[in-house]
Image (cartoon, helix red, strand yellow):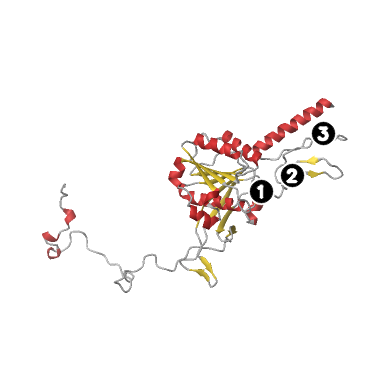
Amino acid sequence: MATSAVARETVFALRRQIAKIEGTLPERLAVPAGERPRARAEGCLHAAPEPDSDVTIIRRGLAAALPDAFLATGIERLDAALSGGLPKAALSEIHGLETRNAGAVAGFVLSLVSLILKGQPLPVLWIGTSEIFREAGFPYARGLQGMFGIAPEQLLFSEAPKLTDALWVAEEAAKMTALAAIILEIRGSPQRLDLTATRRLHARAQNAGRPVFLLRQAGEAEPTAAPVRLIVSVAPATSRRTIAGPLAGSIGHPAFTVSIGKSRTALPGQFTLEWNPDEHAFEERKPREKRPENSVAVVPASGGRTDPAPAPGTVVAFPAFGSFPARDQPSRPQRPAHIGPRRAG
């Protein structure tokens, strides 16, 4: 009996360690009738007692977690699809398929950071390579304060010359509890950003209880240890809302198209979110809220003209080339200059 109990506890410990690395929930071994487990499972996200018993049950997949285990976006449909939101103590991947979406991906992550920083003065560390900062640039300090409510001194930057250095800085920073979150921005699909490297980041985030956001710019969707992958791109902004209605020709709040590429629930979904800089909160754009057509001419008329040219009338056939009468041929000095030979110099 003692040997079987020790073996059962060893299996429990191994399952807990595997579940911690993979970001899933372990399963409880079957307990023989009349015997209670000597040790309860630790590190689980959900535990519920059996009827007429105090045995801990650990379920896999859909589970009711602790209320503070996830970062809720405030969008009910998105949070439900993510089973509560983004995990706080985990590695989350925010993916941009094209380089032109770098601004949208950074803005979406800064929106999440704004939600995290509500009520706490801790700083955030943004790590990136020299390549990505040259390509996508740095966030504008004054824009951080006005758009996301993030003070410039709360956002720290670490520019690494190589990816190995950026990964080392991220792993060391993920162990610190003095940071509210860590952002690691990487361009492309480097070989060093493999499953082993992301597992190390995910384990450090779990141990510290802090989120680590992996920003993938212009890279392929590859296997990572992140339990959640969101694909973000820019969405067209609607007109600015006023008391009298939408203001034609204006630009409203920034908008993001967010697709769930991977999650614990494996539920797909696509959402159009707007960031409200005044409330520092997301708002979901309903499908019927389409961008109004622009009734203003794209190119204004010239100042010296009255009305644009009228629509063309009946199309007539022109005579074939070379059939013009001799009197209609232009004289030699009137021939276009480009017909003559090009002179060098």
| Amino acid type, label 3 | Arg
Whether residue 254 sits left or right of residue 22 in the image: it is left
User: Few, some or many C-alpha atoms within 10 Å of disc 3 (few <14, some 14-19, many ≥20)?
Assistant: few
Sequence-wise first label, 2 or 1: 2
- Residue 327 at x, y = what percent? 12, 65
- Residue 213 at x, y = what percent? 57, 44
Q: Are marks 2 and 1 in contact (CB under 8 Å)?
A: no
Q: Quadrant of residue 92?
A: top right
Q: Which residue was labeled with disc 1?
A: 70
Whether residue 328 sits left or right of residue 32 in the image: it is left
Q: 156 above or below 238?
A: above
| Amino acid type, label 1 | Phe
Spatial CA span between label 3 and label 1: 30 Å
Circle 2 or circle 1, nearest the eye: 1
**Which residue is rendered at x = 82% and y = 44% of the image?**
50
Spatial CA span between label 2 and label 1: 13 Å
Q: Which residue was labeled with disc 2?
A: 46
* SS class, disc 2: loop
Q: Quadrant of the N terminus?
A: top right
Q: Are marks 2 and 3 in contact (CB under 8 Å)?
A: no
Q: 204 above or below 296?
A: above
Q: Nearer the viewer, residue 288 or 263?
A: 263
Sequence-wise first label, 3 or 1: 3
Q: Which residue was labeled with disc 3?
A: 38
**Which residue is rendered at x = 30% and y = 72% of the image?**
305
User: Few, some or many C-alpha atoms within 10 Å of disc 1 (few <14, some 14-19, many ≥20)?
Assistant: some
